[in-house]
Amino acid sequence: MNNHSRTANNKTQASVSAVRPRIKDKRSAILQAALKVFAEGGVNGVPMPVVAQQANVGTGTIYRYFESKELLVNELFREQKVAINQRLYGDLDLQRPTRELFDEVWRRMVLFTREAPHAYRFMELQDHRPYLDEASRQLEHEALAPILAQYRALQKRGVFRSDLRAEVLMTLVWGAFVNLIKAERDGHISLSDADIDAARDACWSLCTG
């Protein structure tokens, strides 16, 4: 092959590469695809070929990275759990007044539902719970432990009400938030900024009694 032909061939290959999408990291593509389709259809309702189609890979390719659907779900859960905790609590200044911290976490939670709806929806769904293995459950426990400890500390300081166990109080706040966002997503209500702030204030009042 002469230099002219070699140059022309290289240009053709470069041109084809430029227009043909390539998956640099198939594992990441599979996880991102799973996040989207599981958030939309639930873990139980989505077969692996649907994940493969969304990821633009063959179904067999998924099983080269994840031996089963359960392993895929758990890997996705752990990845998202770490990312979400960092997003919500990673750089919080715990020296700020308690009410400011409460408001800031609420603001971040709202932003999370807006900016990463698939991640929020996936973590909210309950139908993936039976799939969670011991490592995932342990990670969830470790993620909740410092938040629960903060609730208990605020109860001891007299900031939060003490007639409810910290676990119950924390669950009530989270439940109120989840159902508020769910009602909006299902089209039952349309939330304004004032509505969101009022809900935040109501949860604060719930905590402080």
Image (spheres, grey):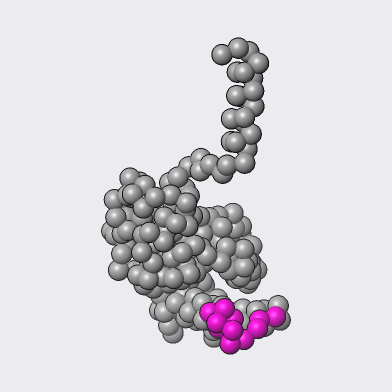
Spot occupied by residue 60 in the image (x, y as percentages of width and height): 33, 49
Tell me the quarter of the picture where residue 198 sits.
bottom right
162 over 145 or under it: above or below:
below
Q: Nearer the viewer, residue 72 or 161?
A: 72
- Res 156 seen here: no
- Res 125 seen here: yes
Taking the magenta stretch, the answer to whether it contains residue 188 is yes
Q: Main secondary structure of the magenta part?
A: loop
Spot occupied by residue 21 in the image (x, y as percentages of width and height): 56, 44
Q: Nearer the viewer, residue 74 or 55?
A: 55
Residue numbers of the magenta segment: 182-192
Spot occupied by residue 92 in the image (x, y as percentages of width and height): 59, 58
Q: Residue at x 56, y 66 (%)?
A: 117
Q: Residue at x 29, y 50 (%)?
A: 67
26 over 35 or under it: above or below:
above
- Considering the image in quadrants, where does the N terminus appear? top right
Q: Is residue 104 left or right of residue 78?
A: right
